[in-house]
Amino acid sequence: MNNTAYFPGCSLKAEAGDYERSAAAVMEALGQPLEELERWTCCGTVYSLTDDDLMHQMATVRNLIRAQECGAEEIVTLCSMCFNTLKRSKVFIEQDAARLETVNAFMDEEPDYEGDVEVVHLLEILRDQVGFESIEGRVTRPLSGLRVAPYYGCTLLRPREIGIDEPDTPTILQDFIRTLWATPVEFAFQAECCGTYQIVDAPELVLEKSHRILNSAMRAGAEIMITSCPLCMHNLRLAYEELRSSLPDKRELSIVYWTQLAAIALEVETGELPTSMGKLVEGLPTTMELVP
Amino acid sequence: MSTSSENTIRIYVMGSAYEVPRGLTIMNAMEHAGWRFTRGAGCRSGFCGACSTVYRHEGDYRLRFVLACQTEAEDGMYLVQLPFTPAPRVSYTLAELNPDENVLLQHYPEIARCVSCNTCTKACPQDIEVMDYVQAALRGDIAQTASLSFDCIQCGLCSMRCPADIKHYHMAQMARRIYGRYMSPITEHLEDRIAEIEKGVYEEELDALVKMTRSELEDIYAARVVE
């Protein structure tokens, strides 16, 4: 195992298979293939805000122990929600030696967690370790002219202490879009909540919030929206299907994972793309064709 | 205080002390002490999962979980039997299921309550990685759930201990059934043999066997070719 262990999370193995496949292909192409953490468990899904509820921190610490066991210094996630839960839980546990001691004592079948494993999102690795400029140099199919809306949602950015960028004025996705030679389209609701798990109990609430996000991006002229969260993706695609039938003109918005956009630019496996996305990409020349 | 001798040990059943011979299984030791199993005993061979037993060693805080028919009684054991687990089992028609990645979660949604505490694994008398198969189920990996839970004997101790009230063993049985019905490779020679049986290829041979006397049967049995 290299220094970075890949933590997929449950969604990536089910509904968001296209996210995992495209990320794996991109990282392979960049010479840093994802190595999956062995025997990982669900992150816990939602971070527990109760500060004496150590039972709900157990899943995170167990995953950190798994990373420690295989000699990894950091866990990298693709799912924003897993990133948020794992990182907040790690910070919470490490803040207070007594908490860590209690959790370690409970998990007496495991080696003690020493508190040295970092939790990062794949976007951070590309920005801080690989470097966006290095990715730019590897683009063989520049996405010139494509207008891409960066949708952050909540869990990549908030709370501030664990976010991967400035929570009110993030730029990492815009920078990434430029790296692929596409044009970032800023819009008012790019860090607005999509409604998350309310989709189960109050779908009308989620649809209202997600419609506002989608309308805002389309009004700003976006053809594509990227996200890093499988739950946002679920809600946005659902909301878009409903919205589409009522759109006055034939405007379309393709909602894809940010790794799928990268996969197109690097010409590697993308995972299944929306039909509208396929149409947008068809017209793009590859660098090879541009060279006389 | 336990008082063991060279040939006997002291065990405690439901709080009462008994002097029993050394070297017996928990089940035999309890029977030796005069207990009669009307529930909580089945195959007596470690396969049926009926004789779930919880015990503690004198001086130890930890509860331990075993099968009474498979575990030797030890001096100073405090024992209780758990012959039944009142866990609900979901009804479904196997042939009508959609075996996708959400099928286990849809039928047993409480698996999403798993906090990875691993208490289930510690309770398993079969040494199955119970938490790992619940986690596999949670991410829709039916094959892995079936494979990791293969040695389950449905004793129910995992569910009795789970702080999230997950019904591990029923859910895993469903996974194994789905795996068998939809995912395991088709065995061609089995299909061929079933077709032969349905065609009546063996009817004549079977009829002949049925009409034989006991001594004729013994003769052909003794003369059979052993591979």
Image (spheres, coloured by chain):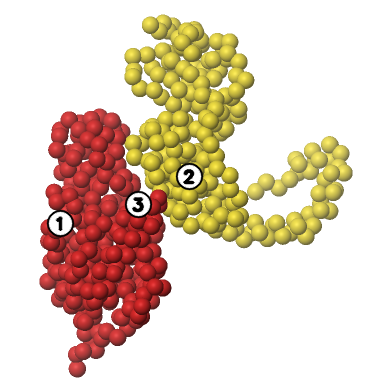
Chain colours: A red, B yellow
On the picture, is A37 further left or further right than B113?
left
Q: Quadrant of residue B162?
A: top left
Q: Amino acid at mark 1?
A: Pro
The reply, left or right, for residue B59 in relation to residue A100 is right
Is disc 3 in contact with disc 1, using a CB cutoff of under 8 Å?
Answer: no
Instruction: Name the residue nearer the viewer: B111 or A38.
Output: B111
Distance of mark 3 from mark 2, alpha carbons?
A: 19 Å
Do the residues at discs 2 and 1 belong to one chain?
Answer: no
Q: Position of residue A285 (x, y in %)?
A: 25, 86
Above or below: residue A247 compared with residue A36: below
The disc labelled 2 sits on which kind of residue? Tyr
Can see residue A240?
yes
Nearest to viewer (mark 2 / mark 1):
1
Label 3: element kind: loop
Q: Quadrant of the C terminus of chain A?
A: bottom left
Residue at left offset 51%, top offset 24%: B82
Q: Could you confirm whether marks 3 and 2 are on the same chain?
A: no
Residue A197: mark: 3
Is residue A40 placed above or below A34 in the rendered structure? above
Q: Which residue is mark 2?
A: B108
Vertical placement of residue A133 versus A128, above or below? below
Residue visible at 39% across and 73% down in the picture: A246
- Asked if marks 3 and 1 fall on the same chain, the answer is yes
Chain to which the residue tagged by mark 2 belongs: B
Q: Name the disc covering residue A251, or none.
A: none
Q: Residues within 10 Å of mark 2 (few under 14, many from 20)?
A: many
Instruction: Indicate the amino acid at tag 3.
Output: Tyr
Q: Disc number at residue A167?
A: 1
